[in-house]
Image: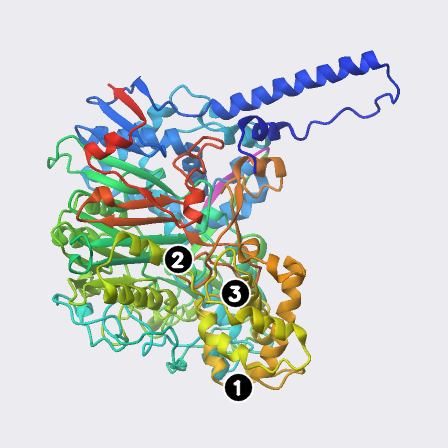
Amino acid sequence: MADADSEDSSALVAAVRPPSGAHRFVSAKVLIRVLAAVLVLLLVITLLGVFLVRRSFPTTDGDMSLPGLNAEVSVTRDESGVPTVEASNSHDLFMAQGFVHAQDRFWEMDFRRHVTSGRLSELFGESQFSTDSFIRTLGWRKVAEAEVAALDDKTRAYYEAYAEGVNAYLHDKSPTEVSLEYGVVGLQAGGVEIEEWTPVDSVSWLKAMAWDLRSNVEDEIDRAISQTALDDEQMADIYPDYPYDTRPTIIGGNAGAKSRAAGSKGSKTGKDKAGDKSSDGEAHAGGEVTAAQPQPPGHGAGSETPSNLGELKQHLRSLPVLLGVNSHDIGSNSWVVSGERTATGGPLLANDPHLAPAMPSVWHQIGLRCTKITPECPFDLSGFSFSGLPGVVIGHNQSIAWGLTNLGPDVADLVVEKIRDGKVLRDSGDEPVTTRKETVKIAKEKPREITIRSTRNGPLISDLEGPYRGVLDASTGANTADTKSGPADEHYQLALQWTALEPGNTASAIFGLNAARNWKEFREASSLFDVPSQNLVYADTAGNIGYQAPGKIPKRGKGDGMLPRHGWKTDEDWQGYIDFKDLPSLYNPERGWIVTANNPVTPPGESVQLSNDFDDGDRARRITKLLRDTMSQGDVTTADMSRIQGDDLNPLALTLIPLLEEIDAGKDTNIAEAQKLLADWDGRDDANSAAAAYFNVLSKTILDEVFAPKLPDAVPPAGGSRWYLIIKNQLQKPDSEWWVDDEVEGRDEALARAMDSAWKTTEDLLGSEPVTWRWGILHRLTIRNASLGESGIKPVERLFNRGPYEVAGGSGEVNATGWDAAAGYETNWVPSMRQIVDLKDFNHSQWINLTGASGHAFHPHYADQTDDWAANRTQPWPYTPDALDRHTEDTLVLRP
C-alpha cells in the first residue's frame, strides 16, 4: 500500500486510457510530442487529484472566526491530531465540538445520517433501495424525532449548540471542500447537496449503534431454522447452556468473593469456586436445555419457514458495515482493578469494545474542558466520542472513569403475526394493521413510494421488497395446531419488537455520565442509559470501583424469547420493563476487581432474568485467570493491563491438542507432520505462527466436516466461543453421533480425517513449506471505508481503504480479532479501540484507536494509529493542562 499523495491520488485517473484506433506507425518526432503531451496531461490530472484530496483537509492552526460563539475557544491537537476543546461555557464547548467533528469527519456523519434516515438511494442509486426500505420500516428517524422532542432543556441546548458548530463549519463550503467522497459520489448521483445538521441527526446514530449490538435477532432466526432439521437432543448439543460451574459470571457464582455493597437484588455474590484453578482446561461438558421451548409456526417438514428465514438472515447480514455485522464476536472486554491491587495505589480500568472494522474508526478521540468547572459548565472530559454526537461515550473526567461492554439482554423479539383481511388476530380481539407511506428518492431515477405496515408489536419486516416478500407466509396446511384450520385468506407475517424502536433517554444519559463525580451520580446517569443496554464498569479517584447493568429490558410473559413468539397469544406479550433498582449492581467487591466480557451477569436465580444468549465465557475466563495470576505475583500495572488486552491464547488449543497428539498417524505423513508442528506450539494465535495457521484451518475443517453436513444450509457453523464450547462438549463423547458419517465411525477417526484435510488445505493456501506459513497471512484485516470501501471499483477502494494488515488473535480470544469460519479466515470483528485509565494519575493512562483522528483519505492522521493498534501498542493519553501543553502540535483559536 503506497502512502505518497502523488501515487495514491493518481488512482483518480486510473481509468484513463489511450484512444483506440491510433496509427501504428508514427515518426519519432511525433511520438515524442505525443508522449510529452500525455505526460503533461497526467501531471495536470495528478496535481488536480492531489488538490482535490487536500482541499478538504481542515485548518488546525491559527485564528478563525466562528459566529455564534459567546467567547473565545481554543482547540489544541497533539501529535496524533487528537483535539482538546477548551471553552468558558457549555454552549461554546459543544458548538466547538460540532465544529471539530465536522472538520475531521463530516462525510462519515452525513453518510450515517443517510443510513439512519433510509436515504442511501439518494447517494448510491437503486442498489440501496432495499436497505432504505428496511430502515424506514424500522422507523429510526421517527423514533429519534420523538426522543429529541422529549429532551430536557439543558440536554436539548447541548445538541443544538453542537449542530450550530457543525453548520458553522459547513457554511459557504462546496461538497468537495468538505470531503473527497462527495466528488466521487457526485459522479454517480449527479451532484450532492449538503443539508444543515440537526439534533435529530445526532440522536439517530444511537439507533444504528443499538442495531450493531442488537441482541439475539439472528439467534432466534437460527434456532427457528435449526429446529426444522434437528431433534431436541441435537438442539441441546448445538445450543448448550452456559457452563456456570467452570466459567465466570460478572457477579456471583465464579465471579469472586462477596461484595461490600448490597443495594439491589443483582448485587448478591457467592463463594468463588474457581479461585484455585490454574489452568484453562475445564471438566464440565455443559448442560442440556431443559426449559420448554415454544415451537414456531410453520415448524416441521414441508414448511417454507427455513428458506424464507434464511433469506431474511442473509439480508440482515448484507446491510452496510456501519449497521454492523451481528455476531457473538461483537461484544467487548472491560475490567477494573482496585487500587489495593495495583502498583499505583489507584484503580486501573481497561476497555476494548469489539465492533466491525470501518474506515475511519467508529470512535473519535477528543478532550472537552470547561475553563472553570461550574454548574453551568461541569465538564472536564477526555475519551472516545462518536462523530455526529456531542459529549464523550467512553473515557474519564476529573473524578471518574468508565467503560462499556455489551450487556446482551434479550430486548428484541421476532413475532409471528396472524393476519386476516387487514387485521391482526389476537385472542383478546382483532386489531387493525397500521400503515403509513413514505417516498424514497433515488439518484437519477424517479422516486418510489413504499407502504410501511405495523402492529402493536412493531413493524412488519416481512412485507418489504426482495427477500422479505413471503417471509413466513404460511398456507393453511402449516404444521401447528394453531394454524392448520385457518381460513384461506389467513396468512402470517413477521414483526420485530425491539426496545430501540421506542423513544428512550440514552441521549441524556451520556451527559450525565460525563458530569458524574461519584458512584451515586454515576448510577443516576446509568438509570437513563436504556438502549443499547451495556455493562458499565466504574472507577473513581477516591479509590472506588463498581459495576452497573442498565437498560430498557422487557419483563417476559409466557415464553423465553429464544424463538419467534406467537403474536396472537397475548400471554406471550411483554409485561412492561424491569425496574432499574432491580438490575444487577456491584460496588467495591472484596476481591478487588470486576471483569465483564459479555458473559452472564449472575448465575440463574441470583438476579432478574436478562437473557439466554450471552457470550460463552472464553474471554471472561481468560481475563479472570490472567488477573489472578498477575496478582499472585505482585501488584497490577498498566503494562499488565495492556498485556492482557493483547492475549491471544486460542480457547480450543489446550483442550484439543492433547487428543490430536494421541491420534495414530499410521502411514499418513500429513498427520505426522501436523503432530510435529503442534508439539511445540504454546496455543497462541500469533500472527507469525505456522502452528496457529494450521490449527485454525483445522478448527474450521472440523466444523465443515463434522457439523455443517448435519445442519441446515442457512445456519453453517461460524466458529467463536459457542462453537468452541460445542466442540469441547463433543470431544468428551467419542461415540457421539456428531462424529459419525459414511466415512468415519467416531471421534478419533473424524479428527484424523480433519487433520489430513486441514494439512492439505493449509498447503493449498500457504504453500508446501510449513516454514513459510503464518497465521497473519490468512487472518488479514482490511479496513474498508464504510460508504465506498466495497464499491467494486478498485481505484475507488484503493483511495479509501487501508490494509491488509496481518493481525494476531482470533475468535473467542481476549485479543478478539474475530473471523467467520463459515466464510474464511479474514478478520471481521476487532477491538475498535483500547483504553487503560490510571485513576491515580490520568496522565499515565494509555489509549489507541483502530485508525486515526481524521476521516479524510491521505490525511496524515487517517490511519496513523493502525500499526500500533495491530501490534497491541498503546499511546500516551495526556490529560492535565501541563501534559497537554507538552504534546500540543497545533493550536486553533476560535473567536466569536
Task: Select label 3 or label 2 by which is in front.
Answer: 3
> Could you tell me which secondary element the residue under label 2 belongs to?
loop
Which residue carries the number 2 mark? 214
Magenta-drawn segment: 437-444
| Front one among 304 and 796 | 796
Which residue carries the number 3 mark? 718
N-term-proximal mark, 2 vs 1: 2
**Is the N terminus in the top left, top right, bottom left or bottom right quadrant?**
top right
Question: What amino acid type is highlighted by mark number 1?
Answer: Pro
Disc 2 from disc 1: Cα separation? 37 Å
Image-based side of 532 in relation to 32, left or right: left
**Residue at position x 46%, y 71% from top?**
652
Is residue 531 visible in this depiction of the protein?
Answer: no
Is residue 208 visible in this depiction of the protein?
Answer: yes
Which residue carries the number 1 mark? 734
Discs 2, 1 touching: Cβ within 8 Å: no
Question: Is residue 697 located in the magenta-colored stretch of the structure?
Answer: no
Question: Dot 1, crowdedness within 10 Å: few (<14), some or many (≥20)?
Answer: some
Q: Position of residue 134 (x, y in %)?
A: 48, 50
Image-based side of 105 in relation to 536, left or right: right
> Vertically, is 102 above or below 873?
above
**Residue at position x 23%, y 68% from top?**
251
Q: Position of residue 145 (x, y in %)?
A: 33, 42
Question: Is residue 442 located in the magenta-colored stretch of the structure?
Answer: yes
**Is the C terminus in the top left, top right, bottom left or bottom right quadrant?**
top left
Residue 712: name its quadrant: bottom right
Task: Select label 1 or label 3 by which is in front.
Answer: 1
Which color scheme does this rendered protein use? Answer: rainbow
Q: Position of residue 241 (x, y in %)?
A: 38, 76
| Front one among 789 and 637 | 637
> Could you tell me which secondary element the residue under label 1 belongs to?
loop
> Vertically, is 306 above or below 400?
below
